[in-house]
């Protein structure tokens, strides 16, 4: 059996998800929506490129553990009914993560379809994060 392409899997998942455009997310943020904005990228991506203002860094490998109230790793900013928007660099990891959160029981989940790259390309505000980070590229 051939290994399925991750990108075909992501494309199929997107039919089940709320795929937010950059403009839609910017509108939610500007409108003062009460949302949890989750940056799933690796820490070096966040430090090197910056982040969407107000986002929380949640490494993709820890998402399920940090989102589960029964886990010893739980972070209390995850709330079952709260609007949660996840993003990564280009929309692949965030689609997978959005599906996982929905499967876990979160009800109001979306992902930024074009990812941080789309956000940046659209000229949206980017928060500089390198000066606040303890992570250093050597």
Image (cartoon, rainbow, N blue to C red):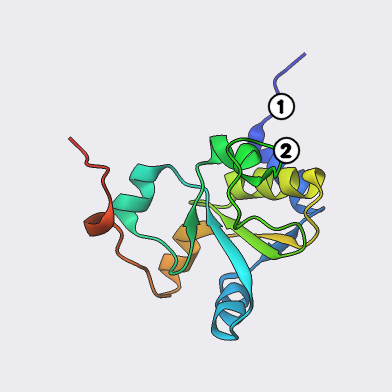
Name the quadrant containing residue 103. top right
Mark 1: few/some/many CA within 10 Å (<14, 14-19, 20+):
few
Tell me the quarter of the image containing the C terminus: top left
Q: Residue 138 carries which label?
A: none
The residue under the point 63% across, 37% down is: 65
According to the image, label 1 marks what residue?
Answer: 4
Classify residue 109 as left or right of residue 135. right
Where does the image place residue 95, in percent across and percent down from the top left? 67, 49
Helix, strand or loop at label 1? It is loop
Q: Residue at x 62, y 78 (%)?
A: 28
Location of residue 68 by image quarter: top right
Q: Are marks 1 and 2 in contact (CB under 8 Å)?
A: yes
Q: In this view, does 109 lie to the left or right of 34?
A: right
CA gap between label 1 and label 2 equals 7 Å
- Counting from the top left corner in percent of width and height, residue 40 is at 52, 48
- Farthest residue, direction top: 1
Vertical placement of residue 102 versus 61, above or below: below
Q: In which quarter of the image is residue 18?
A: bottom right
Percent across and percent down for residue 32 are: 59, 83
Observer-nearest residue: 84 or 24? 84
Query: What secondary structure is found at the residue carrying circle 2?
Result: helix
How many residues crowd around disc 2 within 10 Å: few (fewer than 14), some, or many (20 or more)? few
The residue positioned farthest toward the bottom in the image shown: 31
Report the side of 92 relative to 120 (left or right): right
* Residue 1 appears in view: yes
Q: Is residue 112 visible?
A: no
Residue drawn where x is 71% and y is 27% of the image = 4
At horizontal 48% and vertical 51% (from top left) the residue drawn is 89
Of the numbered discs 1 and 2, the one sitting upstream in the chain is 1
The image shows residue 132, relative to residue 23, as above or below, that is above
Per the image, the residue denoted by label 2 is 9
Q: Horizontal and vertical percent for residue 22? A: 56, 71
């Amino acid at each position: 059996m051939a290994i399925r392409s991750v990108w075909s899997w992501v494309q199929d998942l997107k039919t089940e998800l709320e795929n937010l455009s950059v403009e839609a997310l910017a509108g939610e943020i500007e409108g003062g929506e009460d949302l949890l904005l989750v940056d799933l990228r690796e820490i070096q991506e966040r430090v090197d490129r910056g982040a969407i203002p107000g986002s929380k860094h949640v490494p993709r490998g820890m998402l399920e553990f940090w989102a589960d109230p029964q886990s010893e790793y739980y972070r209390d900013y995850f709330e079952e009914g709260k609007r949660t928007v996840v993003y990564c660099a280009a929309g692949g990891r965030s689609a997978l993560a959005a599906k996982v959160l929905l499967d876990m029981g979160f009800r109001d989940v979306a992902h930024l379809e074009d990812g941080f790259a789309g956000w940046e390309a659209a000229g949206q505000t980017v928060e500089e994060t390198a000066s606040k980070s303890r992570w250093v590229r050597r």
